[in-house]
Amino acid sequence: MAPRKIIIDTDPGQDDAFALLFALGAPHELEVLGVTTVGGNVPLARTTRNALQLTELAGRADLPVFAGCPRPMLKRLQTAEYVHGESGIDGCTLPAPSRPARDEHAVNWMVRTIMDAPEGEITVCTLGPMTNLGMAMVMEPRIIPRLREVVLMGGGYFQGGNATPAAEFNIWVDPQAASVVFDSGAPVTMASIDCTWTAMMTPAWVRSLGALKSASAEALIGMAEFYMSYGSHKFDTPDRPIHDACVPGYLLVPEAFAFRQCSVVIETRSPETEGMTVVDWWHSTGRARNCKVLGKVDAPRFFDRMYRAFATLP
Ligand code: BDR
Ligand code: CA
């Protein structure tokens, strides 16, 4: 089978870095057409530089990187240096990128690429605030029926949120963009924090990457150590959810994820619950079930697949 064509929209972020390298380490199953960046964990200039460095770390200096929206549609950008450090990928030191981002805006490239591809071919994976994809759908709604699937990390159902009591960070940063996407009619699959909290990365698994003896493994270990140092007020173990990696994880081992098809609406108006993913778990509204809500992941299978992907990288 031909590899599945995906666009990765991201705000690296150490867990974005894990996701990116996971996808790039599975070229027989996933063909990454390009990487688009958005302001999120850190400002856009940083996420773009990080994406350039990380693709080079994976030996993919050929992969185009496009800078997208520097801020959400309506809100001011809220960043998360308190989790990811000043650079967004603290914990590793990578060489300066050898190439710049492409000249074209990420949203224009996304629209052009989806319009030029056969219908139902392209999957867009969002690992940060959904500003670029929401903007693309507003600019050119004809991309919507052409998408195969949108797979995102964001939201929550039983857990509520991690940025506020009700909202997960990616959705909370740009609820309007998320609302455009969830409301679009495109098939949406959501790896929420309820799912990602079952993808707990352990210090022992991180240490096991050392056996790969590669530059990418060394950088991943450094990033993991930094990333896992945050959150002792939330977790009673040293293990941490490797959120964004659940997106390529789902694409590569879908059978490892429990799921439920539900109606999901994004709250955009209430100050207390802004950015909440309102999941109709019991189908009480009777609204169309627009979202595949991912649940518990089979962690050993997931981490084994990720390890094997990393083992292919330089
Ligand atoms: C999400 O927020 C970011 O901090 C992570 O990169 C991930 O995409 C988790 O809520
Ligand atoms: Ca992210």
Image (tube, grey):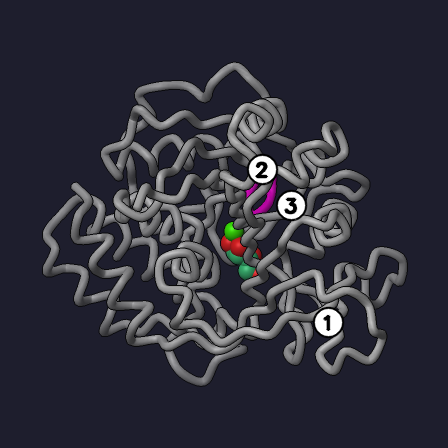
Sequence order check, earlier mark of 2 and 1: 2
- Tag in front: 2 or 1: 1
Residue 21 pos. (x, y %): 32, 47
User: Are the residues tagged 2 and 1 within 8 Å (C-beta)?
Assistant: no
Examine the structure image and report whether residue 226 is included in the region drawn in magenta.
Answer: no
Q: Outermost residue toward the top?
A: 103
Residue 34 pos. (x, y %): 44, 31
Label 2 to label 3: alpha-carbon separation: 8 Å
Sequence order check, earlier mark of 2 and 3: 2
Residue 37 pos. (x, y %): 53, 35
Going by the numbered disc 2, the residue's amino acid type is: Val
Residue at 45% x, 21% y: name it. 101
**Quadrant of the rendering where the C terminus is positioned:** top left
Q: Which residue is mark 1?
A: 279
Q: Relative to residue 223, is residue 291 drawn left or right?
A: right
Residue at 68% x, 74% y: name it. 160
Query: Pointer 1: residues within 10 angstroms few (<14), some, or many (20+)?
Result: many
Q: Is mark 2 within 8 Å of ligand 2?
A: no
Going by the numbered disc 1, the residue's amino acid type is: Val
Q: Relative to residue 3, is residue 12 drawn left or right?
A: right
Going by the numbered disc 3, the residue's amino acid type is: Met
Query: Quarter of the image holding residue 104?
Result: top right
Query: Pointer 3: residues within 10 angstroms few (<14), some, or many (20+)?
Result: many
User: Are the residues tagged 3 and 1 within 8 Å (C-beta)?
Assistant: no
Q: Which residue is mark 3?
A: 130
Label 2 secondary element:
loop
Label 2 to label 1: alpha-carbon separation: 26 Å
Please give the range of residues in magenta: 38-43
